[in-house]
Amino acid sequence: MKRKKFMRSMKDAVQGLLFVIRRERNMRFHLVAAVLVLAASLYFKIDRIELFFVLTAVFFVIIAEVFNTALEKAIDLFTTEYHPLAKIIKDIAAGAVLCSAVFAVIVAWLVFWDKLWTQIIM
């Protein structure tokens, strides 16, 4: 019985992620960026510590986008009319995604700048 509940929970979680990927343009953008960054990680053969920070940044952005979408959908469930407080809540959630994306850019810069610069010079 518990295995069925676990498997059902996993299926529901995957469906939630697929919903966000299919319906949210920004999530698709984040996933393309993640693939490019991971490809660069392989190309430049970054070390394990650098890979840890790159993966942390990638997942941080994806998780923030998922929570942002969930919060937006929850607000939309309760009101279809414009409400200034609903706008503020949505803006705050979007701000969290922006902060995570800035963090990811900083990590990418710290990890890849020297490697890119070396490639350009040579």
Image (cartoon, helix red, strand yellow):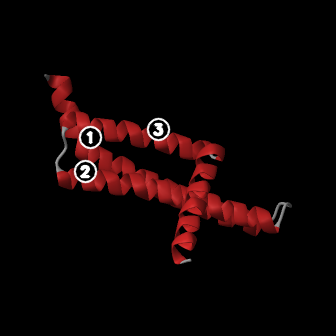
Q: Which of marks 1 and 2 precedes in the sequence? A: 1
Estimate the x, y position of residue 114 in percent, counting from the top left: 18, 38
Which of these two is toward me, 10 or 17?
A: 10
CA–CA distance between discs 3 and 2? 17 Å
Estimate the x, y position of residue 65 in percent, counting from the top left: 54, 55
User: How crowded is the residue under tag 3: few (<14 C-alpha within 10 Å), some, or many (20+)?
Assistant: few
Q: Which residue is mark 1?
A: 41
Q: Residue at x 31, y 45 (%)?
A: 108
Q: Residue at x 25, y 38 (%)?
A: 42
Secondary structure found at label 3: helix
Q: Which of marks 2 and 3 precedes in the sequence? A: 3
Q: Amino acid at mark 2?
A: Leu
Q: Residue furthest left?
A: 122
CA–CA distance between discs 1 and 3? 14 Å
- Horizontally, residue 95 falls left or right of residue 119, namely right
Q: Which residue is mark 3?
A: 32
- Horizontally, residue 100 falls left or right of residue 75, namely left
